[in-house]
Image: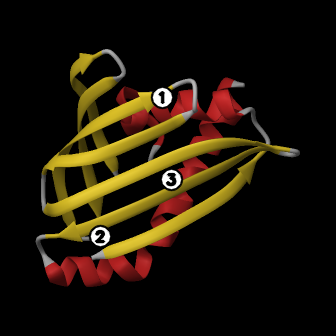
C-alpha cells in the first residue's frame, strides 16, 4: 500500500486549476505518460473515465469513478478496474494569498507488488510532474 500527500501553491485561481484537473478528456494532450483519456459515462457530477498510462516499462489502462464537487472545488477518484487492488485519490483547491493551494492525496494498492515497490520510491516525483503539467496547461489557457 502506498499513501502520499502532495501540496503546491500555484499562481492561478482555485477555479482555473479545478477546471483543468476536471478536464479528464484532455489529459492525454499534456500529461506525460498519459497516452489516452476518455469519458465512458456521465451522470450528474459523477463520471467513469478510462486512462491509458505508461510509466517506465509498465503500461496499461485503468477505469475510475470520479466525483466532482464544483462548490467545494474538490475531486475524488476511486479506481474500479485496472492493475490495482484499490486506488483512491482526492484533489482539493484552496484559495491562497498567492493563488491556489493544490492538495492531492493518494492511497494505492497495486496487484503487482514489485511494481508497487518501484512506484513507491517515485510516486511523489510523478505527482509533482503531473501538477507541473496542470500548471503549464494553465499558463497556456489563462
Q: Earlier in the sequence, mark 3 or mark 2?
A: 2
The answer to whether residue 38 is above or below residue 82 is above
**Cβ atoms at labels 3 and 2 below 8 Å apart:** no
Q: Secondary structure at mark 1?
A: strand
**Cβ atoms at labels 1 and 3 below 8 Å apart:** no
Residue under the image location 27 percent in, 47 percent down: 78
Q: Which residue is mark 3?
A: 130
Q: Which residue is mark 2?
A: 56
How far across and down, in percent of the image, does residue 8 sit?
A: 68, 57
Residue under the image location 22 percent in, 49 percent down: 79
Q: Which residue is mark 1?
A: 69
Q: Earlier in the sequence, mark 1 or mark 2?
A: 2
Q: Gap between marks 3 and 2, in whole Å?
A: 15 Å
Q: Nearer the viewer, mark 1 or mark 2?
A: 1
How busy is the neighbourhood of tag 2: few (under 14 within 10 Å), some, or many (20 plus)?
A: few
Q: Gap between marks 1 and 2, in whole Å?
A: 33 Å
How busy is the neighbourhood of tag 1: few (under 14 within 10 Å), some, or many (20 plus)?
A: few
**Is residue 32 at all visible to an observer of this figure?**
no
How far across and down, in percent of the image, does residue 95 sit?
A: 76, 40
Quadrant of residue 140 within the rendered picture: top right
Q: Secondary structure at mark 3?
A: helix
Q: Gap between marks 1 and 3, in whole Å?
A: 21 Å
Residue under the image location 69 percent in, 43 percent down: 94
Residue under the image location 46 percent in, 70 percent down: 4
Q: Nearer the viewer, mark 3 or mark 2?
A: 3
Amino acid at each position: 500500500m502506498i499513501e502520499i500527500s502532495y501540496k503546491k501553491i500555484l499562481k492561478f485561481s482555485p477555479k482555473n486549476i479545478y477546471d483543468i484537473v476536471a478536464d479528464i478528456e484532455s489529459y492525454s494532450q499534456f500529461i506525460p505518460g498519459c497516452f489516452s483519456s476518455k469519458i465512458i459515462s456521465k451522470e450528474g457530477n459523477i463520471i467513469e473515465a478510462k486512462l491509458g498510462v505508461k510509466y517506465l516499462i509498465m503500461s496499461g489502462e485503468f477505469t475510475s469513478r470520479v466525483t466532482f464537487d464544483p462548490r467545494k472545488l474538490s475531486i475524488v477518484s476511486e479506481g474500479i478496474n485496472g492493475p490495482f487492488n484499490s486506488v483512491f485519490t482526492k484533489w482539493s483547491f484552496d484559495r491562497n494569498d498567492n493563488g491556489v493551494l493544490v492538495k492531492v492525496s493518494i492511497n494505492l494498492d497495486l496487484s503487482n507488488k514489485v511494481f508497487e515497490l518501484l512506484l513507491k520510491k517515485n510516486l511523489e516525483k510523478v505527482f509533482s510532474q503531473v501538477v507541473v503539467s496542470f500548471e503549464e496547461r494553465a499558463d497556456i489557457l489563462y
